[in-house]
Image: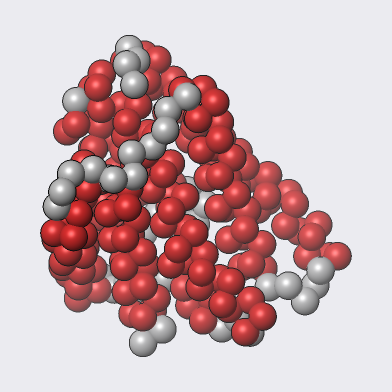
Amino acid sequence: MDFSKQKSLVLVAEGFFVVLACQALGGLLLTPELLEFFPSVPLVSFLIFFSLSAFFVAILYLWKRTSFKPIYWRGKNLFFCVFAGMVAAWLILFTNTLFIGNYSPLTHQISSLGSQYFYPAIFILFVLGPCLEEIFYRGYLFEIMKKPFGDTAALVFLSFLFMFGHFVWSGFTIGHIALFFYSIIFTLVYIKGGLIASISVHAFLNFCLFIISNG
């Protein structure tokens, strides 16, 4: 994609705004109404659904605006990229857990769901969530920014967005800083191996967070 700096920033802002707007609409406006009609459905199920639906809508929006198809496979060292990314992500997770703690309210709430909602939530956490987030952040936002700003600037800016997107509704804690470094790892893995690689590392990290939060 060949965009000017101004155009790329506008597209990134538009895509990120779509995510936040859809999450606000679903989480703040629709969820309370749906809970009245479906009181047996856990709150976290609605929040997960609307959060990921927001990424799906934003991906469609950016696809229509750019006509760009994300790069799913890149290079010949896919397995090495995935392995190296998993090791790096685990080291940051271990360090963060050791010095700060890594309790995740979301993964803890998922573990308390009944089987009717638990398995769909696990599928979302380990498969659908990493896919949609990586396509949005790496597949579109990074690709939009990297040519006009360069890989390094795009990587840093994207990592701040990734961190902000994870605490904007819950409030910032010191533990959220780790998300900045996770995003750097995901992006570096994406640069070398494509979306398949970054999705795999992201899913591995979510699995580790789930185990730690419920250990």
Identify the residue shown where x is 43% and y is 49%. Answer: 133
Q: Residue 17: give x, y in percent of width and height.
A: 53, 33
Provide residue 47's location: percent of width, then percent of height.
Answer: 61, 60
Nearest the eye: 191 or 137 = 191
In this rendering, would 170 be left or right of 82? right
What's the residue at 68%, 73% (across, down)? 42
Q: Which quarter of the rendered picture does the C terminus lie within?
A: bottom left
In this view, 195 is above or below 203: above
Left of 20 or right of it: where is 102? left
Q: How many marks?
A: 0
**What residue appears at the point 36 percent right and 80 percent down from the top-left corner?**
211
Quarter the N terminus occupies: top left
Instruction: Name the image colouring.
Output: secondary structure
Residue 36 appears at what percent x and percent y?
84, 65
Instruction: Looking at this view, name the residue that lies furthest to the front.
Output: 76
Closer to us: 120 or 76: 76
Q: Residue at x 56, y 71 (%)?
A: 121
- Give the x, y percent position of residue 174: 30, 59
> Based on the displayed image, in which of its 4 quarters is residue 113 positioned?
bottom right
Choose top left, top right, bottom left or bottom right for residue 19. Answer: top right
Q: Residue furthest bottom?
A: 215
Mark yes or no: residue 160 visible.
Answer: no
- Please state if 191 lies on the left or on the right of 21 as rendered: left
Is residue 126 shown to the viewer in this render?
A: yes
